[in-house]
Amino acid sequence: MLRRSFGLKEYFTGFFLTGFFFVFPALASANTDKLGEQLVKDQCSTCHKFTGIPESRFNLKGPDLMWGGSKFKRPWLIDWLTGKEPNIYLKGYRWDLERKVQPHVILSDEGANSVADYFEKHLLDSSAKKDAIDLSHFTELQAAFGRQLFIDHSCSGCHQIMDDEKTMGGPQSATFFNSGKRLNKDWILRFNSMPPDFVPHSGEFVADVSELGLHYVTGFLATEGDDEFKFYEPWKSNHFSNTDSNRGRTIYKEYCMQCHGAKGEGDGPAASGLEPRPAIHAKMAMDQFPLDYLYNVVYYGGKAVGKSPYMPYWGLTLGEQGVADVIAFMQEEFKGDTNASVNEPASTQKSSGVCPEKRTTRKVSFKYSGKKNPLTPSPAHLKAGETLYQKNARPMACRLCHGKKGDGKGPGGAGINPAPRNFTCSATMKSISDGQLFGIIKEGSPGTAMPAFKNLKDKEIWQLIHYIRQFNK
């Protein structure tokens, strides 16, 4: 395709006189509008459609743009038109005819801004209502939910996304590497609600998701690759500045004690039928767990963080204030074993983990089982693993449950059944492969309280494994 640069001078050379835009601002605006219209007519319309009704991809040369003003964010559109953004159709738009990317026409800055102006004024989608979706309270975990729904409903079969700095999914349709920079949130919601409305009879898929699921998927796409988006952190909200532990005590009695027991002993009436058993809060130092972790467990449930699916998601029932109050009560009420503080020096802690451990964990999926640690146990990797284990791993530092010395005796692990792994036990650790450890850290361990650490990069997990292995050497 043509690569020649087109701009304002191409059409209005006679008007480019010194001071013109200052003397005749209305005329300048009119001329800019005219340029945008002319570029759309002369250049864009050779491949794209701007009027009429939605048509099948197989009747078009390029994407339908009659709603482009609602679809694209202006900065991305200008960068795309000026050749600063990569092609989003890796197989070409008409993959049924030719599976290679054709270069797009490049406009000058003036031309690109004029086209963007034209899009915003004339190419709007009336069905994409402004502020139809509110992302002011959209959390990072909700984005993770949306991402998982995107994968679970096979959207990644056609659209590629990033996974630990690598691409995943099929390259047949538009990529979503930076969809948050490219697409407007309200248009994403409208498209996701019924994709065939926009590109009928073209393989577009209608997913069976709830209204909340639609919110999560839309939020994921609206924030993916957008470094300027700030996720909402509810544990920093006014709800947590105005907690009432007495209200929390009442909530614990009304909702939590049926599993965790009236005194947090894990002996509620429902506990006898559950495996794994409910956490024994009375033995856990709840005040030492990160607030964001406690919030996510209570609000979104155990399954959301790779723990037991028996733990319900209480957020819709209790609301943010109720969640904040019950957490405040638990942190005030349950201090665990004060002799095993997370901040206690390693030299004074007792290494009394069971060895060998008689329990087993479910084997991880095949994609992990054969993995070997690609990193050497160098001082740099061991130091990085130590930092993650002792301080920075999220949703929480490993030492909270597994102990500072890796003996399974951390301040948060005393109330967990089965108990956290004792990494100091050679008899146990020698039977666990690198791949098994990798899979457990990445996706959690069903049947135990081990959460998923999906936000860790592969390299960080391998560094953690090297550090964990040194506990029994």
Image (spheres, rainbow, N blue to C red):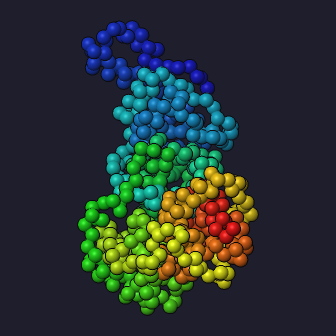
Q: Quadrant of the N terminus?
A: top right
248 up-or-down from 289: above or below: below
Farthest residue to the front: give it: 347
The residue sitting at 37% across, 10% down in the picture is: 16
Give the residue at x 49% y 46%.
225
In the depicted structure, whether residue 207 falls above or below residue 128:
below
| Residue toward you, 313 or 272 | 272
Residue drawn at (50%, 91%) of the image: 272
> Does 162 sit above or below residue 90?
below
Compared across the picture, whether 442 is left or right of 129 comes to: right
Q: How many marks?
A: 0
Please give left or right for residue 115 compared with residue 86 in the image.
Answer: left
Q: Quadrant of residue 462?
A: bottom right
Q: Position of residue 313 (x, y in %)?
A: 42, 73
Q: Is residue 105 left or right of residue 360?
A: left
Does residue 160 appear in this view? no
Q: Position of residue 278 (x, y in %)?
A: 48, 82
Residue drawn at (33%, 8%) of the image: 18
Say left or right for 449 vs 232.
right
Return the residue nearer the eye: 55 or 190.
190
Is residue 471 or residue 150 the one in the foreground? 471
Percent from the top left, x then y, of residue 27? 29, 17
The picture quadrant where one finds residue 358 is: bottom right
Locate the C terminus and report the quarter of the image it occupies.
Answer: bottom right
| Whole-percent x, y for residue 78 in the image | 46, 31
Residue 266 quadrant: bottom left
Q: Is residue 314 in view from this perspective?
A: yes
Is 449 placed above or below 376 here?
A: below
